[in-house]
Image (spheres, rainbow, N blue to C red):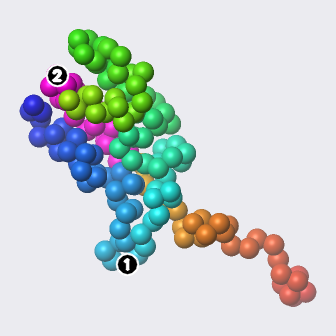
Amino acid sequence: MVAAPKHRKALVGMLLADSRLAETQLRYADARGRRTRVPRDWRLCRLCMNDVEDTLHALFVCSASRDLTALRDALWRKCAEEKTGGGLQRLPSRECFHRMLLDIHLVPVLAKFAYDVLAVFEKVNMFVASEAYWHGQDPRGETRPDALDAML
């Protein structure tokens, strides 16, 4: 179905949670012990910082990058050209993704789109929230001077 190996690998990686997106990468502690496991709610999108950076967000929701929105617009145009892909844009993300995966004509289009989307995300460093954020603390620490500091 998907002739290009790099496109197939990108799509399969997104399906099996084996991609370079934060939702997958921050699920585990760093092998060298430099980073602990990040709770899912804090695996924020590196582009918009508004939602968890997972497959559906990256493919269909995030609009913080012009490149990403241009790719998505091109995807919807290609889907409209197919007999079965006309109304996909109006569906919820999960249902749209599932329907595209079930359409033999749209799977290669989706695979190329997945590859291109991952390329956009890989241009930007992943956001890794500090543990202070998880616990509701200011990660910069206390900024007010102590009474003792004021006396010195």
- Based on the picture, tell me whether residue 113 belongs to the magenta stretch: yes
Amino acid at pointer 1: Gly
The residue that mark 2 highlights is: 105
CA distance separating discs 1 and 2 = 44 Å
Q: Quadrant of the N terminus?
A: top left
Residue 97 on image: x %, y %: 31, 33
Dot 1 falls on a residue whose secondary structure is: loop
Name the one closer to the observer, 113 or 107. Answer: 107
Dot 2 falls on a residue whose secondary structure is: loop
Asked which quadrant contains residue 71, the reply is top left
Amino acid at pointer 2: His
> Residue 33 has which mark?
1
Residue 143 appears left or right of 25: right
Is residue 81 visible in the rendered image? The answer is yes
The residues colored magenta run 103-122
Residue 141 appears left or right of 88: right
How many numbered marks are there? 2
Name the one closer to the observer, 13 or 84. Answer: 84
First-in-chain label (1 vs 2): 1
Is residue 68 visible in the rendered image? The answer is no
| Residue at the image position 24 percent from the left and 16 percent from the top | 84
Asked which quadrant contains residue 102, the reply is top left
Residue 62 on image: x %, y %: 46, 37
| Residue at the image position 23 percent from the left and 11 percent from the top | 83
Q: Main secondary structure of the magenta part?
A: helix
Residue 11 on image: x %, y %: 22, 41
Q: Quadrant of the C terminus?
A: bottom right
